Image (cartoon, helix red, strand yellow):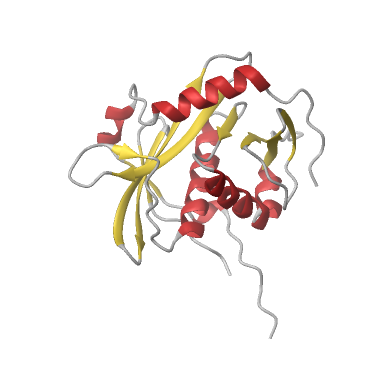
Amino acid sequence: MFLKPYELEANKDFTSFKFISIGVKGRISKIIQFIPIGIVSEAVFNLAFGDKVAGTEDYDDAIVSDNGDAEKILITIAHTVFRFTNRNPGCWIYARGGSPSRNRLYRMGISKYLDVISKDFRVMGEVKEDWELFSPGKNYSAFLFKRKLYKFEE
Amino acid sequence: MKQKKPTFNYKSGVVRINESLNKYDNVVLFPKKVEMAIEHLKRVGLPKEIEKQK
């Protein structure tokens, strides 16, 4: 069974993506943003996403929408990471949930699809102030992704 | 009957360019997340060595 992501809209640089989550609570507009973090020697982009706050132009990453489509949302986010790193292949993508339960959700999603994800990405998890290769079932407080670069012989 | 494990591939996604999203090009929508990331990476740094992932 192939799981499809939500249809995405993006800005010209592929740093902002928007989609509509459709679930038990209706249609919820969500945005994903990649922001450069210029504090280390290598390029790192923070990945964050949130829900549109009803009646405003604001987005909030603390809202728990509970729309019953968490897995489809995670797959949609995975697609944005793939698209973004098509354009920025050498960078790290940093992701961290706003709460332990969010991190657990991310960890479960990564674990479930690690065989697919790890074909194209190195996945690291942070535990006790150190990074290690992501291992399913282990608790991490943050995640890093880096696109694997393949060299093709002519 | 054994159920197949769900999977996905990156080719199945559709991305349309929406010019209206260009307004976020110089806007940090989730500043607290970025602050947290900066603070964390300053403390922990990046991985020193990448081993092969199975």
Q: Is residue A84 left or right of residue A18?
A: right
Residue at 70% in and 81% down: B2
| Pick the front one: A100 or A48 | A100
Give how far across and how far down residue B30 sits, in percent.
39, 31
Residue drawn at point x = 29 percent, y = 58 percent: A27
The reply, left or right, for residue A98 in relation to residue A17 is right
Considering every residue shown, the one lying at the far left of the view is A55
> Based on the displayed image, in which of its 4 quarters is residue B53 positioned?
top right
**A115 sits left or right of A106 in the view:** right
Residue A60, position in %: x, y?
34, 39
Looking at the picture, does residue A46 appear above or below residue A140? above
Locate the N terminus of chain A by quadrant: bottom right
Please name the residue shown 34% across and 21% down the image.
Answer: B26
Count the marks. Answer: 0
Instruction: Answer above or below: position of A28 versus A90.
Output: below
Which quadrant: the C terminus of chain A?
top right
Question: Can residue B45 be seen here?
Answer: no
> Within the image, what quadrant is residue A142 found in?
top right
Percent position of residue B10, x then y: 55, 51
Instruction: Determine whether A4 is above or below A55 in the image.
Output: below
Q: Residue A12's spot in the image, x, y percent?
A: 36, 32
Q: Is residue A128 left or right of residue B29?
A: right
Residue A63 seen in render: yes
Name the residue located 78 percent from the left edge and 30 percent from the top edge: B50
